[in-house]
Image (tube, rainbow, N blue to C red):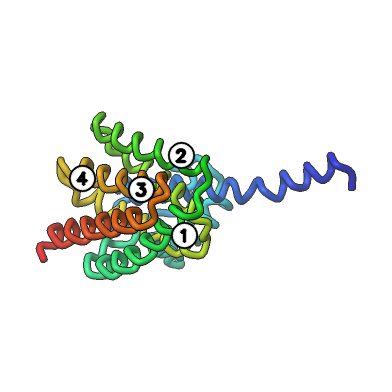
Amino acid sequence: MNAQESATDASTRTDLPTKTDSAYDRLEEQIVTLRLEPGSTHSEQDLAAQVGLGRTPVREALQRLEADRLVRIVPRVGIRITEIDGLAYLDALDTRAVLDELLAGQAARRATPQDRSELSECAALMQQAVAADDTEQFMALDRQCDEALGRAARNPFAMDAVRPLHAHSRRFWFRHRHADDALESAVLHAAMLLAVADGNEGAAERASRDLSNYLDAFTRRALDF
């Protein structure tokens, strides 16, 4: 096989996963921002049309979303968006807190200079989105910053475990948020991201705990506990 054939073969192998990732990202965003309402049922064909991608990558993305507990694939019925279960979500938050603190500490130790620059920029952009009252941009940046932190931590096992918990957190927060919540969330995220960027492991872990405590209190207020 010559170099051109190798390049073509590599392109073919990576094309479908890229489309699947794109389908996953678009569907997750619509679930998290409630454009796909909890409890609603959709056909695979309708979802493919909604995100503008073929049914094969959408089908594969839906399998991932089912593993994340964001959808249920019901034979002969369709794709059901899962309900928001407050009590189960509190368990998810407890799990997320442990993983987030681990990732924050590891990222503070392991981040490259490029990672640290990206995390500093993430902190600034989140606060800019809040100042512009752009909730959807804030939500997108929340996800991007989580991913940047995960890359900096160099721990794909922890990141794979926490990623769906972040998605459930964003959806719950989006459903129950009030006017000042974006600012408080952005400040707490920024504190953690900047501590990681500074390489201060202890401060990063403390900031992660502060963010987790805020999310727990936010959830209990929303559930009237």
**Which label's residue is closer to the chain start, 1 or 2?**
2
Q: Are marks 4 and 1 in contact (CB under 8 Å)?
A: no
Q: Are marks 1 and 3 in contact (CB under 8 Å)?
A: no
User: Could you tell me if the residues under marks 1 and 2 are in contact, i.e. CB atoms within 8 Å?
Assistant: no
Compare marks 3 and 2 and give the one earlier in the sequence.
Answer: 2
Helix, strand or loop at mark 4: helix
Decide: is 109 above or below 67: above
Compute the Cα span from label 3 to label 2.
13 Å
Residue ID at (22%, 69%): 87
Residues packed near mark 4 inside 10 Å, few (<14), some (14 to 19) or many (20 plus): some
Label 1 secondary element = helix
State the residue position of label 1.
159
- The residue that mark 4 highlights is 184
Give whichever of discs 4 and 2 has the lower sequence position: 2
The percent position of residue 116, horizontal first and vertical second, equals 46, 42
Q: Which residue is mark 3?
A: 195
Please name whichever residue, 155 or 167, is drawn nearer the observer in this view of the structure: 155
First-in-chain label (3 vs 4): 4
Image point 56% across, 46% down: which residue?
54
Residue type highlighted by circle 4: Glu
Q: Residues within 10 Å of mark 3 (few under 14, many from 20)?
A: many
The residue that label 2 is drawn on is 118
Can residue 78 be seen from the camera position used here?
Answer: no
Q: Quadrant of the C terminus?
A: bottom left
Identify which residue is drawn at 34% across, 68% down.
95
Query: Dot 2 surroundings within 10 Å: few (below 14), some, or many (20 or more)?
Result: some
The amino acid type found where label 3 is placed reads: Ala
Q: Amino acid at mark 2?
A: Glu
Q: Amino acid at mark 1?
A: Met
Which of the two labelled residues, at mark 1 and mark 3, occupies the earlier sequence position? Answer: 1
